[in-house]
Image (cartoon, rainbow, N blue to C red):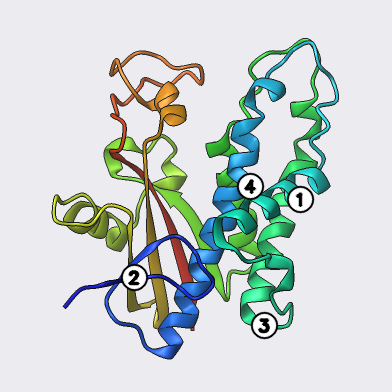
């Protein structure tokens, strides 16, 4: 029988099926990584007008500032301060690697964000998240990977295309009317002869994302892509987390 539970750490994601102790730990780590990514992406989203202001040079968005604001958003959402997680634990090490990736991406794009006389910089939340995930997945390739993907019809960057398991899970489970909205999907499986724990965190279109992904379908958005015609509350993407055993 399916049921929804909340993790002890207070991460606000629904979870299907009973969990063993090891699965509970893995899921806690995976959802923590998803929440930190969302938190950092929110900082970038909230500052899009500032980033794209051609009349402002230094935006004041240093890596220290962005990471601090992301930690605060994470803490408000979960009730847990990520800085209190044991840095020697698997959870702590992965979260530290992710915050390092966030800081590095922000540092490497300072010139772009602070370029005077230029409006749209192209440093949007989706691009930021992809760069962070690529950096994290490369540095922790033997332990974990994170990416943001979506139904194939909604993917704009080929690097974000879902793999076979992700595509099947999205189409046959997350997108079905029977799937409880907001509930995450998790599964133990094998990947390249290794045992893996995989998690999909569904994300739905909010007002902000519809600016680029809403209606009218086909209209070119500010990034140069045609809008997908998405509607408020529809599945717009998925954070996919893999933990290698």
Where in the figure is residue 127, as x and y percent of width and height?
57, 37
Label 1 to label 2: alpha-carbon separation: 30 Å
Q: Reading the chain from its start, which is encountered first: label 2 or label 4?
A: 4
Front label number (1 vs 4): 1
Q: Quadrant of the N terminus?
A: bottom left
**Number of marks in the image?**
4
Residue 235 falls in which quadrant of the image?
Answer: top left
Q: Reading the chain from its start, which is encountered first: label 3 or label 4?
A: 4
Label 1 to label 3: alpha-carbon separation: 21 Å
Q: Which mark is residue 14?
A: none
Which residue is found at the position 46% from the left and 50% from the top? 148
Where in the figure is residue 25, as x and y percent of width and height?
49, 81
Above or below: residue 50 compared with residue 139:
above
Q: Determine whether, in the image, residue 231 is placed left or right of residue 129.
A: left
Front label number (1 vs 2): 1
Q: Assess whether mark 3 and mark 2 are in contact (beta carbons under 8 angstroms).
A: no
Label 2 to label 3: alpha-carbon separation: 22 Å
Q: Which residue is mark 1?
A: 68
Q: Which residue is mark 4?
A: 40
Q: Determine whether, in the image, residue 86 is placed left or right of residue 12.
A: right
Q: Residues within 10 Å of mark 2 (few under 14, many from 20)?
A: many
Where in the figure is residue 233, as x and y percent of width and height?
30, 37
Q: Which residue is mark 3?
A: 89
- Secondary structure of residue under mark 1: helix
Q: Determine whether, in the image, residue 126 is placed left or right of residue 219.
A: right
Above or below: residue 158 compared with residue 11:
above
Where in the figure is residue 21, as x and y percent of width and height?
43, 89
Q: Reading the chain from its start, which is encountered first: label 2 or label 3?
A: 3
Q: Reading the chain from its start, which is encountered first: label 1 or label 3?
A: 1
Q: Which residue is mark 2?
A: 186
């Amino acid at each position: 029988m399916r049921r929804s539970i909340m993790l002890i750490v207070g991460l606000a994601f629904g979870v299907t099926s009973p969990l063993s102790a090891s699965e509970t730990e893995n899921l806690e780590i995976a959802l923590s990584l998803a929440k930190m990514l969302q938190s950092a992406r929110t900082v970038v989203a909230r500052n899009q007008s500032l980033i794209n202001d051609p009349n402002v040079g230094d935006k004041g968005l240093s890596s220290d500032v962005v990471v601090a604001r992301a930690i605060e958003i994470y803490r408000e959402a979960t009730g847990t301060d990520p800085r209190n997680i044991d840095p020697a634990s698997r959870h702590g090490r992965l979260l530290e690697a992710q915050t390092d990736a966030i800081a590095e991406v922000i540092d490497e794009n300072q010139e772009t964000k602070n370029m005077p006389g230029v409006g749209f910089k192209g440093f949007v939340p989706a691009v930021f998240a992809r760069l962070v995930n690529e950096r994290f997945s490369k540095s922790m390739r033997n332990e974990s990977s994170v990416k943001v993907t979506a139904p194939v019809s909604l993917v704009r960057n080929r690097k974000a295309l879902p793999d076979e398991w992700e595509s099947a899970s999205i189409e046959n489970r997350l997108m079905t009317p029977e799937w409880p909205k907001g509930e995450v999907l998790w599964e133990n499986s094998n990947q390249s002869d290794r045992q893996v724990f995989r998690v999909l965190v569904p994300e739905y279109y909010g007002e902000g994302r519809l600016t680029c992904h809403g209606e009218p379908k086909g209209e070119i958005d500010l990034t140069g892509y045609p809008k997908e015609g998405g509607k408020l509350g529809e599945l717009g993407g998925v954070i996919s987390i893999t933990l290698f055993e």
